[in-house]
Image: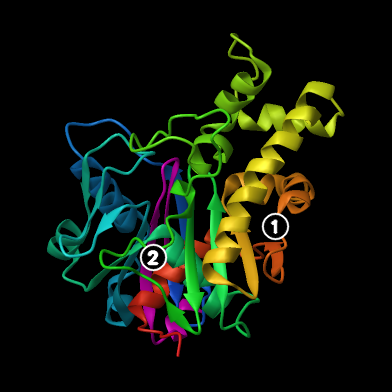
Amino acid sequence: MAKKAKNLAFAVDVGGTNLRVAIVDDKGKIIVKNVVKTVRKGKSGNVVAEQVIREIKNIAPKAKLWEYMKGIGVSIAGPIDLKKGRSVNPPNMNFKFVPIVAPLKKEFKLPVHLINDCNAGVLGEKYFGAEKKYNNLVYITISSGIGGGAVVNNNLLTGKDGNAAEVGHMAVDTKYNVACTCGKGRGHWEAYASGNNIPKFFRIFNDLETKFPSGAKDIFDAARKKDKIALKFMEELGRINGRGLSNVIAAYDPEIVVLGGAVALNNGDLLLKYAKKNIDKFLKLPKIKISSLGENTPLLGASSMVFELSCG
């Protein structure tokens, strides 16, 4: 199948938890993919680029297929600096800068396209998901962190540096006034409802000093077992998520909101059940659903940059 492809791309998704690398064709078919834990320690963010290079080489096609490789698309957690081709102070990574474009260009002699992970996500949904018919859509990842990407009137919103729709850092709460892991403010959506921060919010809400439960999965599992403390927390988490979704709807007036990321993909039923009760009805509500592309959404969106697809 791969040998018949005329256009192939390396697609890379650098997340706070996992690094995904794939070879994708221009129809959105993933030829091969590998997933590893993103490196989190080193003298500088260069170690991330070095890891990406190693993983690309691990899945690189045979030499005779290189003629079909059109470039490398990289989705990475923001904020990003498009001019310098790097991520800057990503909240869920431990480096001040993560350079990407220059090291990959030097190593592979291919065009390299960098995009915010959630902008990649919304492009993945637009081109390769079930959402092709929509001209106004928002993709939100609820994973290690929270972020968003928006297509409005068939135009991808990027902003001056490529960081438009950083919805995880919209303010959603003043009651608990929780400091965000971005270090830039309090009350941000990500500080309460991301995979990394749900356990902390659980302890604050329940006034617990212990570290139990140890992770977001434990809390969702307890809620499924009808644990009273976990269910009470789900109501409050639903209020926070409802506020976040209300902000998104008011800002972008989408036809559909698609949720991705590990927390949403694994617990979408609970998230939507409690969030929908708390969404403002100021504007007509869009459809809200869990991504059908699963964890591959940003990878596919990154590949679309290589193939130069455009929303129009």
Q: What residue does disc 1 label?
A: 280
Asked if residue 9 is among those painted magenta in the image, a careful observer would answer yes
As rendered, which of 264 and 151 lies closer to the eye?
Answer: 151
Quarter of the image with the C terminus in it: bottom left
The label number, if any, that marks residue 51 in the structure image = none
The type of colouring in the image is rainbow
- Foreground tag (1 vs 2): 1
Asked if residue 95 is among those painted magenta in the image, a careful observer would answer no
At label 1, the amino acid type is: Asp
As rendered, which of 35 and 251 lies closer to the eye?
Answer: 251
Alpha-carbon span between mark 1 and mark 2: 37 Å
Q: Is residue 32 visible?
A: no
Q: Residue at x 41, y 42 (%)?
A: 16
Region rendered in magenta: 1-23
Provide residue 82's location: percent of width, then percent of height.
22, 64
Q: For the residue carrying disc 2, how many other residues have a C-alpha within 10 Å: few (<14), some (14-19), or many (20+)?
A: many
82 horizontally vs 78: left or right: left
Q: For the residue labelled by badge 1, is the local secondary structure a helix, a strand or a loop?
A: loop
Q: Residue at x 31, y 52 (%)?
A: 79
Q: Residue at x 44, y 84 (%)?
A: 5
Task: Determine which quarter of the picture holds residue 204.
Answer: top right
Provide residue 205's location: percent of width, then percent of height.
65, 23
Q: What residue does disc 2 label?
A: 11
Upstream in the sequence, badge 1 or badge 2?
Answer: 2
Q: Is residue 232 visible?
A: yes
Looking at the image, is 66 positioned above or below residue 210? below
In the current view of this chain or complex, which residue is farthest to the bottom? 312
Provide residue 145's location: percent of width, then percent of height.
48, 43
